[in-house]
Amino acid sequence: MKMKKIAILGSTGSIGTQTLEVVRANEDLTVTALAAGSNVELLDAQIREFRPSLVAIWSEEKAKELKERVKDLDVEVAVGMEGLLAVAQQPEAEILVTAIVGMIGIRPTIAGMKAGKDIALANKETLVTAGHLIMPLAESCGVRILPVDSEHSAIFQCLNGESSKELHKILLTASGGPFRGKKKEELRGVQPSDALKHPNWSMGKKITIDSATLVNKGLEMMEARWLFGVEPENIQIVVQPKSIVHSMVEFTDGAVIAQLGTPDMKLPIQYALCYPKRRPLPGERLDFSRITEITFERPDLESFPGLQLAFDAAAAGGSLPTVYNAANERAVAWFLDHKIGFLDIPDLIGRCMEAHKVIANPSVEEILETEAETYALMENMRF
Ligand code: NDP
Ligand code: MG
């Protein structure tokens, strides 16, 4: 049997652990490298089950602990950014799953592509900030970028066998998050524990907060723009509260094609890993004898200004999406730490965007400098 060899950045997270479930269920998939931030207990268990030859851990202190724990095994332990880059470029791996959170994924993703790996991309922050570099690089390296994000996988599936020239627009669906229907004033006092209750999906903390602010949809709009070569004005956000329709595309003749399913990330993960083949997947199925309606709404840009700011950032382009993303990453961390309120998240993003002088076509270095400048600016804005 020909084995497909997989490296995973962020193996201990929500997408990472679900990727390993897919690997477990498909005997021709095997894991050759793993990377995580600091969760040594889980990483240790993953090493023992999946036997990768290389693992990376971000925290230096935790690396010592991990080395001690796995000294009975034949596995190399690498550390920090060097470790992430080693996992991304590991010679034996064929496909790199980017399930790490945040724009820290930029350098490893680029390194993986340059080493000839196909990318199963969950890490949307990388495409939002560096899409103008990543997409042409994929082309010149001859590697594929296979979307893992459910909406983008849906669009990718809808475009199967179609010509991108005949694509008129993308209809990107959103659940609306836990605060759908709330007015701005009602959102002032919401706590992290309220925002972490997503109605349909169970995900990592950062993306769950992004779903509550609708910043996630803004990031996904920019992700879609790069993946499918569509201008932001041809991406329409459609709220579909039950997350049954995972997204849709409209063609030049007006035909609309949608992908539907239960909210289970294992489907897009498995589709990316096994593309272009479909495989059986256990779990719940849509039951159309019980679904009586599928409803659609317009997003509320008044209550969720973070979504409008994403369209502003995309329209200006260059380094502004980096400011949008970096300000959001930092603001979400502060919100989770109870340092700022929920409405401060879009407020800080907007203020950082206003203060920024846009660099057209930024290099990786300029993107990382813009990120650092945004964080520095925010330190002075906090109080
Ligand atoms: P989680 O927070 O659940 O997991 C993040 C993973 O990244 C963990 O394995 C974490 O390790 C690791 N990590 C974080 N920082 C570092 C670092 N500096 N070095 C190495 N590893 C690091 O996030 P999700 O799985 O929810 O999300 C991952 C990405 O996928 C995000 O970009 C998100 O937007 C995207 N995505 C997620 C979806 C979902 O359903 N969860 C859906 C669509 C997209 P540790 O546990 O050790 O800290
Ligand atoms: Mg999504």
Image: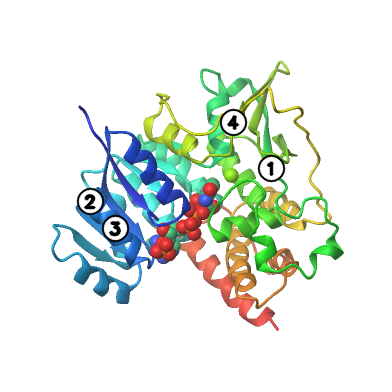
**Front of the two marks 3 and 1:** 3
Picture disc at residue 52: 2
Q: Residue 301, image x and y in percent?
A: 80, 51
**Front of the two marks 1 and 4:** 4
Position of residue 17 relative to residue 279, above or below, is below
Picture disc at residue 45: 3
Residue 83 falls in image quadrant: bottom left
> Is ligand 2 within 8 Å of the beta carbon of the residue shown at mark 1?
no
Dot 2, how many residues are within 10 Å of its Cα: few (below 14), some (14-19), or many (20+)?
many
Q: Amino acid at mark 2?
A: Pro
Mark 4 / mark 2, whichever is N-terminal? 2
- Closer-to-camera residue (128/192): 192
The quarter of the image holding the N terminus is: top left
Mark 3 / mark 1, whichever is N-terminal? 3
Mark 4 / mark 3, whichever is N-terminal? 3
Picture disc at residue 174: 1
Mark 4 residue element: loop
Give the side of residue 323 with respect to residue 138, left or right.
Answer: right
Mark 2 / mark 3, whichever is N-terminal? 3
Q: Residue 45, image x and y in percent?
A: 29, 58
Q: Amino acid at mark 1?
A: Ala
Q: Identify residue for label 4.
A: 261
